[in-house]
Structures are given as C-alpha cells and as structure tokens.
Image (spheres, coloured by chain):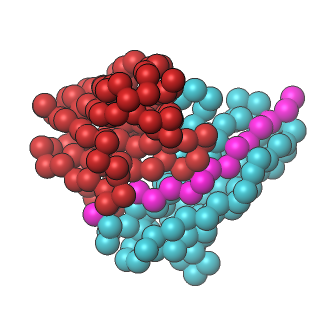
Chain colours: A cyan, B red
C-alpha cells in the first residue's frame, strides 16, 4: 500500500536558517505529492504540491521537487521566520487509491528569534 | 471568502453521551471528508462522501457515523464516545476525487471526553 515517511522532529532553528524536512514515499501507480502546514490550533492548509515527476512546487519561499528516482519530496526554505513555526505534513494521493490521501506523521518546526 | 467551517471549535462531552460535530462548506465541492487527528499525528481518514455516496474506511469503528443532508453540510456523529475518542476532528473538502485534487481543511473541532 501507499506510505509516507517524514523526517522525525521536532526541528528547532534560528531565524534565517536554512530548512530541510525530508519526505520519502512508497506508492502504487502515479501519485501526486503535497506538503500541508498546520499552525497551532488550526486545520491543515496546502503549502505546495507537485503532480508529476520533476515538477517543483513552491509557495511562500518554500520549495519541493518531485523526485521519482529517489521517491522523495523534500521541503526546503532558504531563510525561515518565526512565523513558519508549525507542523508540516507530507502527503500523497494515488490514482490507484481513489484519490484518497496518505499523510506522514508530521514534523514540528520551531523557529527562534 | 469560500471556506470550510466547523462548529463548535471545542466540544466537551461525557463518556457514553452521543455527540454531533458539524461541518459546512461554501466551496460547492463534491467531496467531504472526516479525519481524526491525535496529538499532531497524521490525520486518520474516517470516511468521506462523494456527493451523496458514503464511503467508510475499513477500520473506522461502528461508533462513528456520518450524515450529509445536502452539498454544504456534513455531520459526524459519535454514538457512545469513549475516552479514546478524545481528539481533533478535521473536516475537509475537495472538488473531486482525483489524485491531483487539493483538500481544503476546516479549523477542526477538539473533542474532550470526560
């Protein structure tokens, strides 16, 4: 079946540091890949997505590239801010699973001033 | 703004007392989902509706039921809440069931069982 493995947290960085959160996946068929962010006390919201190999999703300074050869979708940001503190979920949705999403366990990011 | 709304944001119930959580959407999406999320773990899909068609996940306990009376509203009923059902319940929508579809989440209802 489908699965998503995320880098274990929590991750603590200083403001303006470089961020990488690793995500690898196993999927049957041709998945789309997503990063969702959950701020404290809120629901998840889409951060970025990529629907085919070599696509790069980007939003708010975050980027992730769909790497089919390494089955990865690592999230990166060049300079984090305190306001980026949140839980980040990697997810996939496969054409062989009726479009239902499989989520990773989430990575908690704390950015300190 | 089009959105997914969940009420209430916090719900306290007693062990064994039925409780209903509600979700509404102004996106006019075909699909509505209910997830259970514990302690910032991965959301666990309980069931979803595609229009009026109900799809239950195989491991969702019978204690959890859902109703979708119209396109805009969907309800989660917990018939006899146990202590283990205390969690955040997230409602989400998507335009369709395709694998490229983005899901739009509500803010969640945090359920406390006493």
Near-viewer residue (B113 or B95): B113
Q: Decide whether residue B49 is among the magenta residues.
A: no
Near-viewer residue (A28 or B18): B18
Asked whether the viewer can see residue A109, the reply is yes
Q: Is residue A103 left or right of residue B6?
A: right
In percent of the image, x 73 and y 42: which residue is there? A109
Asked whether the viewer can see residue A45, the reply is no
Q: Decide whether residue A99 is among the magenta residues.
A: yes
Rendered view: B103 above or below B74: below
Q: Please report the bounds of the magenta region as a residue range.
A: A98-113
Near-viewer residue (A39 or A3): A3
Rendered view: A18 above or below B16: below
x then y, percent, for residue B9 = 45, 20
In percent of the image, x 85 and y 32: which residue is there? A112
x then y, percent, for residue A41 = 57, 26
x then y, percent, for residue B55 = 22, 53
In percent of the image, x 13 and y 31: which residue is there? B69
In percent of the image, x 36 and y 58: which residue is there? B59
x then y, percent, for residue B60 = 35, 52
Q: Is residue A94 left or right of residue B31?
A: right
Numbered disc total: 0
Q: Quadrant of residue A75?
A: bottom right
């Amino acid at each position: 079946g489908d699965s998503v493995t995320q880098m274990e947290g929590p991750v603590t960085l200083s403001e303006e540091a470089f961020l990488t959160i690793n995500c690898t996946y196993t999927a049957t068929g041709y998945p789309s890949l997503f990063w969702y962010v959950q701020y404290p006390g809120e629901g998840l919201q889409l951060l970025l997505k990529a629907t085919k190999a070599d696509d790069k999703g980007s939003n708010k300074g975050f980027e992730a590239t769909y790497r089919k050869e390494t089955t990865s979708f690592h999230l990166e940001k060049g300079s984090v801010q305190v306001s980026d503190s949140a839980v980040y979920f990697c997810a996939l949705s496969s054409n062989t699973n009726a479009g239902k999403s499989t989520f990773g366990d989430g990575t908690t990011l704390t950015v300190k001033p | 703004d089009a959105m997914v709304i969940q009420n209430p944001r916090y719900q306290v119930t007693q062990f064994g007392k039925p409780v209903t959580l509600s979700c509404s959407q102004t996106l006019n999406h075909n699909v509505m989902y209910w997830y259970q999320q514990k302690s910032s773990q991965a959301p666990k899909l309980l069931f979803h509706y595609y229009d009026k068609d109900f799809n239950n996940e195989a491991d969702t306990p019978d204690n959890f039921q859902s109703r979708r009376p119209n396109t805009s509203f969907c309800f989660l009923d917990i018939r006899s809440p146990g202590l283990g059902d205390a969690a955040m319940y997230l409602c989400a929508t998507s335009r369709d069931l395709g694998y490229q579809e983005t899901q739009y989440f509500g803010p969640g209802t945090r359920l406390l069982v006493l």
